[in-house]
Image (cartoon, helix red, strand yellow):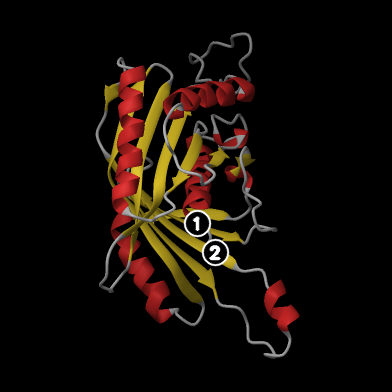
Amino acid sequence: MKLYFVPTPTAQPADSSTTASSLVSALETLFPALSRAAPWALTYRLFRDTAPRTDPSDTSAQSQYAHTYQHLLTHTALSTQRAYIHIAPQPSAPGQMQAQSNGANKPGSVTSIPASQSDARALLLRHQLAALWTPRHMLSVQNGACYTGGLFSIYIGEVRALREGQGGGVSSPGVVVCISTTIGGEADEGVQSEGVDENGVEPIDLDFAQATIRELWGKVRAGRDLGRAEVKEVFMAPSGVGASDARPGTGGKGDETEAAVRMWCEVLRLRG
């Protein structure tokens, strides 16, 4: 699985809509055999911990403090019943997440709560725990496009920035594109075929997966004006895709979901 974030320099929803429509049109033209699936949606909130008080004159202490981030994500393509909480430290250096970076190898914990408790969790952090956590931004995707066919599932959505409890216009930081491909699967029960480990999981050909996804993305974006801003690219770690070291009884799905959550949170963190 790989995520591409296409920034909208103007932050205008109309410009993001144009980009998304252009990508959808290209996808439908190039791959007419793809089937349109049910739309998807997400809501994402980012909180950052509050730095401890220091001597105002000690600027070095303030600049060296490494913040911890709390991500709150609901994503219908991952689960319609669960919301995910990802707590992770700040990346070690600005600009660390560049093209070909690995979003799922980031440290930090991932847990889930009922989706119905997502808003209550956000309110708790925003009000009761305001001294500990500072809200950074809230994003959403509504009625995102989803296409499936062959080895691929492709998700395209316009990202909108929301202001909780405030008026004002809506902005759009960009468009997100998620491409996943089947690169291994469960072996038949009781059958140990060549190239399959003792857990019945085929080894992952990461080179094949990345090359296949990049080829599809290259065709879709070819000739499309995506602006001058650099497209952010994050690839899910091998431990999150059908991993043979997955927890017993999960068949790798638990690790895969956690890796996907980390990947989405890293992309949606923007510059938070």
Q: Mark 1 points at which residue?
A: 269
Front residue of 176 and 168: 168
- Give me the C-alpha separation between circle 2 and circle 1: 9 Å
Front residue of 27 and 266: 27
Task: Say which amino acid is labelled 1.
Answer: Arg
At horizontal 40% and vertical 75% (from top left) the residue drawn is 126
Residue 181 can be seen in this image: no
Q: Mark 2 points at which residue?
A: 69
Task: Say which amino acid is labelled 2.
Answer: Tyr
Front residue of 46 and 176: 176
Residue 223 can be seen in this image: yes
**Quarter occupied by residue 235:** top right
146 lies left or right of 212? left
Residue 237 at what x, y percent from top left?
A: 60, 37
Q: What element carries label 2?
A: strand
Q: Earlier in the sequence, mark 2 or mark 1?
A: 2
Circles 2 and 1: CB distance less than 8 Å?
yes
**Quarter occupied by residue 240:** top right
Vertical relation: 118 (above or below) 25:
below
